[in-house]
Each structure stands twice: as structure tokens, then as C-alpha cells.
Image: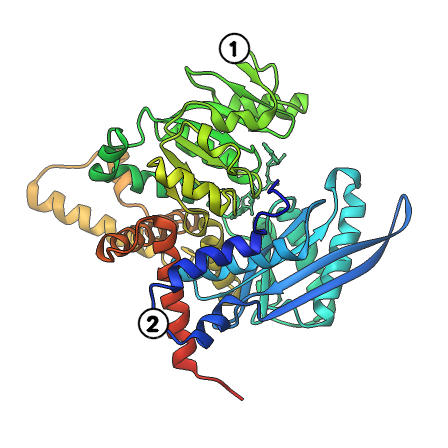
Amino acid sequence: MAHASAPSFFETVNIYFDKAAALTDYPPGLLEQIKGCSSVYAIQFPVRTSRGYEVFSGWRVQHSHHRLPVKGGIRYAPTVGEDEIKALAALMTYKCAIVDVPFGGAKGGVRLETKKYTVQELEQITRRYTAELIKKNFIGPGVDVPAPDYGTGPREMAWIYDTYSAFHPGAIDAMACVTGKPVTQGGIRGRVEATGRGVSFALREACAVKEDMKALGLSPGLEGKTVVVQGLGNVGYHTAKFLQEAGCIIVGLSERDGAIHRPDGLDVEAVAKYQKERGSLLDFPGARNVTPTNQALELECDILVPAALENQITVENAPRLKTKILAEAANGPTTAAAEQILLQRGVLIIPDVYINAGGVTVSYFEWVKNLSHVRFGRVGKRFEEAAFDRMLSAVEKATGRFFSEEDRHKIARGADEIDLVNSGLEETMITAYHQIRELMKRESRLKDLRTAAFLNAVQKVATTYLELGIFP
Ligand code: NAD
């Protein structure tokens, strides 16, 4: 947790914004319009639980209306508060701009410890929160589209969709009111793992740049790089899994109650299975326990991936971090003061506002799918296959040589939904990385990727606002 006098999470995001804004010559009023939260909705709502009559605090913040709908996850955690939701909503605006996803930023949250409630109670809380959003038009396919975040997942998104459609009978686009739904409820294949997959694509791009790796004393490529991941939830687990598949050595994994360390590498799947069975990853065979858990952040590694919550890397522990690359899979894991320390120490920070954008990117694909009412790949797959097949036959005819059935099957294959989703995600993460990095190289006053990413976002949002003008 940040020190009481340290800037709050929203203030931290605004420090980053101001740093980038200072490099522009937009009118101060326009910058103020971008920076502030357009609408903040704070609610208290009652739910009958096993403890009797309980009142919950919830929020939905719409940070920027420069594009609609606004988009952002819903967080369930005991620490949720207005400042945090405002910070996360602002990050969503910048994030969507960076990866060219045509949404404004938003975020929602309910203050609760999910572990204390039964599934039925969580359903009641989620439905009541959704009803509160409906009352004030803070949810809808063209207005505001939530998604999962810390403490929520496809199950909650299905309840939100069902509640929304119950209040909007006959609304043909109701399914697009929320993303991250189960695939059987209009969700899209690849959404669950999208953020982690996006993080691994981003790291692959960053590590492929020879010049940058040389500056860190590392060889190019992901192969053989040592990795520590904090938080084995949706984002952390998938990031660790994809990085391991790409040839990284996962030397440390941490969860709330403790961390484990094994310099020779941990098998992510085996650790996740062990944790599921035992409720803890401690005492994993062959690994050393690390307690308190946050000491895992200080383990020797090439890539450190905080994938839990904000304010994990502070002035207190930043000087002791031994990583060369900090991949901010979580939102806001590094305080502004800690960032200064790490930059001075030459750490390459790949900022949250870019690196965890894979989730919203695939949410965007899900929204498009819901509005078009057809699965990606359904219309063209067989046609593509037939066209490839004709091409192979033409090659065979011209060369007099024949493909094996196996090769023919591999080459003449139309794209399924998952292929298109992953390809769109990969394209998005690659393009955005190079946009940010090239901006940093071009503008000599830019020294770090975060400020470059914020500048990229400010330019895009400012352009939209300027073109739209002010009405009424
Ligand atoms: P999650 O609830 O699935 O997982 C988070 C995990 O972190 C949990 O397993 C929790 O026990 C663990 N954790 C909490 N405190 C910890 C600590 N001090 N040390 C180690 N582990 C700890 O949440 P998630 O969806 O994976 O989100 C994680 C982060 O990624 C959040 O900052 C979220 O805003 C961000 N994010 C999520 C998505 C998404 O698609 N889910 C997209 C972008 C960003």
C-alpha cells in the first residue's frame, strides 16, 4: 500500500498524463477535459444475504466520452473505492486510444470480499448492481459496456447480460451490453486468456528489438529469459503459461498467501493444479517458499510481471528489484516515485496502459460479434478452404508434384473464430508497441515507454475532441 502522503492512484495516473501533456501544445482547457472524469456514479445498494440485510458501496466511472460506448471492467475487492475506480477508468481511456479500440474509458467496482459470499449471494449482488447501472443509463451496447476485472469473470458477465436483457425485452443488441461473457452466452473464444496472451505478444516484441536488449545486457528473444509473476489469477496465470510456452523459464510465482521460487523453472500448469487442489501454492514440490509473499518481487529475474493489484512496487522496494524488464500486466502496479528509481536504474518498463490492453482488444471483437450477430469465421471459412484447395491443385498441376493429405489439410484451412481473434490481438499488440517505441525514438524529450504511450493516447483523444467540437 502507498504511504498516506504519497499520491493516490488517480493522482498517479494524472502525474503520468501531465508529463506527456507537457510535451504538447494543446489548449489547457482541452487537456483538462481529457484528464478529468466525465461522469462519476456512486451508489449504495442493499442485498439480503445470509448475514441479513447488507448495504454495498459501488461505483461506475465514465472517464471520457470522446468515443462511445465507454468500456471498462468491473472489480470486486474489499479495497475498492472511488479514487481507484477513477484511476482505472482513466487508464481505460488511454489504453483504448493506444491500441485503437474505438471506445471511451470507464470502470466499475463493488467493495466486497468475494470469498465471504456464496455463489447465490454473488449473483444477487451482481444483479442488483446491474439494476442500479440500468436505472441511470450507465450500461448499454451504445452507452457503457462493462467487462471482467479483478474478482469477476465470465460468470458475473452472464448475470449482468441476463439482468440487462430482462429489463430490455426485445432489445436485439442486448448481448453487446457486456463483454467477457461465457462463449455459450455470446462470448468470444480467446477472451479469457486475451490479456495474458497480449502481455506475452508485447514481451515478444520488446525482446525482439536487439538494440534495446543489448542496452539491458540481454540477448534478443524470449527463449531462456527468467520470469517472476505476481498473482496467479486470470492475467498472471495466462501470462506465465504463454511465456513458458514461448521458452521462458518461470522462476517465481506468487499468490496472496505466499510465493514459490525455483531457479530451474516451475511448470505453470502443475503449480496451478497444485494450488487449486490445496488452496495454496506453498510447499510445491521442488520449490522454495518465499514469505512474506511480496518478497517474490525482489527475486533475480529478467522479466518481472506484477499481475495482481496496484501499488505493489513502491519507493520502499524499488531499489531492491533485480529485474531488467518490468511488464505491468496489472493496472497501476508501480507508483510514480518508484518508477523514477527504476528508470534511473535502467529498467525497461513496459507500461500497464499498453501491455494489458489485450483484454479490451478482444472485448472489442466480442462487442462487434454481438452487434453483427454472427461468429467470426462462420461466413468465410469454407470459402477460404476451397480457394486454398484450388490453389494447391493448380500448384500440383504446374509442378507435377503432389502434397500429402496431411500437408494439404494444414495449408488449405480456413480461419476459425479463435484464429481470427488471436491474429487480431497479435496485430494490435505489435502495431501499438512499435507506434509507442518509434514515438519515443522520434521525440528526443521522451525517455520512457510510459510517457510515450500517454503522449500517443493524448494526441489521439485530443484530435477526436477537437474534431467533434463542443455541443450544445
Ligand atoms: P484475478 O482476480 O483473476 O487475479 C488476481 C490474483 O492476484 C488473485 O489470484 C489474487 O489472489 C492475487 N493476489 C492479490 N494480491 C496479491 C499479492 N499481494 N501477491 C500475489 N498475488 C496476489 O484478477 P485479474 O483479472 O487477473 O486482474 C489482475 C490485474 O490485471 C488487475 O490489476 C486488473 O485490473 C488487471 N487487468 C485485468 C484484465 C482482465 O482481462 N482480467 C485486463 C487488463 C488488466
Residue 366, visible in the rendered structure: no
- Residues tagged 1 and 2 counted as in contact (Cβ below 8 A): no
**Which label's residue is closer to the chain start, 1 or 2?**
2
The residue nearer to you, when weighing 31 against 383, is 31
State the quadrant of the C terminus.
Answer: bottom right
Please determine whether, in this image, residue 392 is positioned above or below residue 241.
Answer: below
Q: Nearer the viewer, mark 1 or mark 2?
A: 2
Displayed quadrant of residue 467: bottom left
Image-quadrant location for residue 87 = bottom right
Q: Which residue is mark 1?
A: 286
**Mark 2 sits on what residue?**
25
Q: Which quadrant would the N terminus be assigned to in this image?
A: top right
x and y, in percent, of residue 237 in the image: 52, 33
The local crowd at label 1, few if under 14, some if 14 to 19, many if 20 or more residues have their Cα within 10 Å, is few
Q: Secondary structure at mark 2?
A: loop
Would residue 235 appear left or right of 151 to someone viewing this image?
left
